[in-house]
Image (cartoon, rainbow, N blue to C red):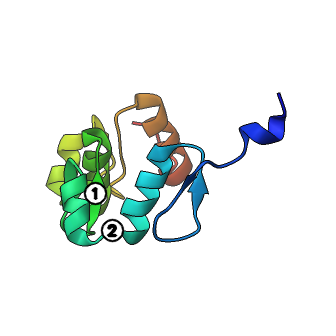
Amino acid sequence: MDDNKLLTSIHKCSKCNFTASYIEVINSHYNTIHATNEEKKTNSKFYCENCNIGFNDEYIFKFHYAIHHATKEERKKYYNFYCETCNYGSNDASVFNIHMSAFHNTKK
């Protein structure tokens, strides 16, 4: 089989010339670039009212919220390890220790 045929895009966006091999990529593209806010709300399981961005994965939506919109107290609830100095959070101890060493010259 010709390798170039495997790379040929078969799905096209109805609003522009964007093409992709998978319909899911086209749908994501449409929802990100072309959809109205009402369409984004309708097409998404989780919707950020602040940014007008839709998500179909709850974890990714919560991650987005924690990074961009949560208060300091809310952020602390999302993470097992939380840096009071710069509000960085992580659920992984080794990643948190790397952060502390790299940015604050200490380990917790």
Looking at numbered disc 1 in the image, what kind of residue is underneath it? Gly
Looking at numbered disc 2 in the image, what kind of residue is underneath it? Ala
Q: In this orientation, which residue lies closer to the viewer: 34 or 8?
A: 8
Of labels 2 and 1, the one closer to you: 2
Q: In this orientation, which residue lies closer to the viewer: 67 or 30?
A: 30
In screen coordinates, is 43 left or right of 26? left
Which residue shows up at 46% across the image and 59% down it? Answer: 29
Residue 34 visible in the current orientation: yes
In screen coordinates, is 91 left or right of 48? right
Q: In this orientation, which residue lies closer to the viewer: 54 or 50?
A: 54
Label 2: how many Cα within 10 Å (few below 14, some 14–19, many 20+):
some
Give residue 27's position: percent from left, percent from top.
41, 53
Label 1: how many Cα within 10 Å (few below 14, some 14–19, many 20+):
many
Whether residue 93 is situated above or below residue 56 in the rendered picture: above
Mark sitting on residue 54: 1
Residue furthest out toward the left:
73
Which residue shows up at 19% across the image and 57% down it? Answer: 42
Secondary structure at numbered mark 2: loop
Give residue 13's position: percent from left, percent from top.
50, 61
Residue matched to label 2: 35
Give residue 44's position: percent from left, percent from top.
24, 52
Secondary structure at numbered mark 1: strand
Q: Do labels 2 and 1 touch, CB within 8 Å?
A: yes
User: Of marks 2 and 1, which one's residue comes earlier in the chain?
Assistant: 2
In screen coordinates, is 84 left or right of 104? left
Mark sitting on residue 3: none
Residue furthest out toward the right:
2
Label 2, label 1: how far apart the Cα atoms are:
10 Å
